[in-house]
Amino acid sequence: MPAVVEIRSISKHFGEGAARVDALRDVSLDIHAGTVVGLRGPSGSGKSTLLNVIGCIIEANSGRMSLNGELVYDRKWLRRDLRRLRLEKIGFIFQAHNLLPFLNAWENVAVALVLAGASRHEAHKRAMELLTYLGVEKRSEAMPGQLSGGEAQRIAIARALANDPRIILADEPTAALDSQRAGTVMELLRKVAQEKQSAVIVVTHDEKIFDRFDQIYTLRDGALENPQTLAA
Ligand SMILES: Nc1ncnc2c1ncn2[C@@H]1O[C@H](COP(=O)(O)OP(=O)(O)OP(=O)(O)O)[C@@H](O)[C@H]1O
Ligand SMILES: [Mg+2]
């Protein structure tokens, strides 16, 4: 079975000349359906850049990338509708939950569905299903300011899952949580990976959750310290 995320020799730099920063150097990686992969490394080692490249937010400078079996980047982006690709195939979860403060919990989830074309009625129904799946349906009418950190992060996960993405990218999703809440978030991500056969990639410094991953990769100065053995 092909990997959900297949990256070959991806490099990315910012700036030129003396100001040039090589954020990713020749990174190759396969991430398979149903797995939860950790990405760690010192500050500035390229972790967020790699997530943003996989999420088609940042265009790399060289290499190749396939998502869900589709070649989307080969020395340049090959797809015109990256917005639709992001909406339909990729779920993002950030350190701070990034909920919209003027919408309640279910509306924050419904927004992602409406953007992808759902009616308000369908979006409400699906949002409530997702909140139930994540065990926060009782907080569906609460505003973000009324939610605990763990509840807000679960709403943010529900939003990331709204369109059934095959790829879930999480940048420090447990950094603001205590170890029990962090454990719950990781269990939920594992459940999603297994039940939806998604590939989940989690950037983390959080040693408490290192034992929760199928594999952990370490970036140092933009390069993978423990590369996989891959077919070309
Ligand atoms: N938009 C940008 N413009 C210029 N340089 C950038 C940009 N984004 C990232 N960089 C640089 O690229 C390198 C990698 O940054 P990145 O954000 O990927 O690190 P990180 O591993 O996520 O770090 P942290 O753990 O602090 O979040 C850093 O040197 C950073 O300063
Ligand atoms: Mg970062």
Image (cartoon, grey):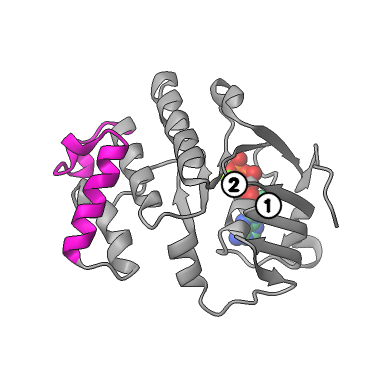
In 3D space, how far apart are the residues under numbered discs 1 and 2 (Cα atoms)? Answer: 9 Å
Q: Residue drawn 16% across and 62% down?
A: 121
Q: Circle 2 sits on which residue?
A: 33
Nearer-the-camera pick, 21 or 37: 37
Residue lying farthest front?
Answer: 1
Residue lying farthest bottom?
Answer: 80
Nearer-the-camera pick, 8 or 165: 165
Which amino acid does the dot numbered 1 rest on? Met
Q: Check contact, mark 1 vs mark 2: CB within 8 A.
A: yes
Q: Is residue 120 visible?
A: yes
Q: Residue 160, relative to residue 53: is it above or below?
A: above
Tell me if the residue at label 1 has its CB under 8 Å from ligand 1: no
Q: Is residue 102 visible?
A: no
Residue 119, x across and y down, in percent: 21, 68
1 or 2: mark nearer the eye: 1
In terms of secondary structure, where does tag 1 sit? Answer: loop
Sequence-first disc among 1 and 2: 1
Q: Residue drawn 62% across and 61% down?
A: 67
Q: Quadrant of residue 131?
A: top left
Residue stretch in magenta: 120-149
Residue 225, x across and y down, in percent: 80, 38
Residue 85, x across and y down, in percent: 50, 68
Residue 129, x across and y down, in percent: 25, 46
Main SS, magenta residues:
helix
Q: Is residue 60 magenta?
A: no
Q: Circle 1 sits on which residue?
A: 1
Which amino acid does the dot numbered 2 rest on? Ala
Q: Quadrant of residue 22?
A: bottom right
In terms of secondary structure, where does tag 2 sit? Answer: loop
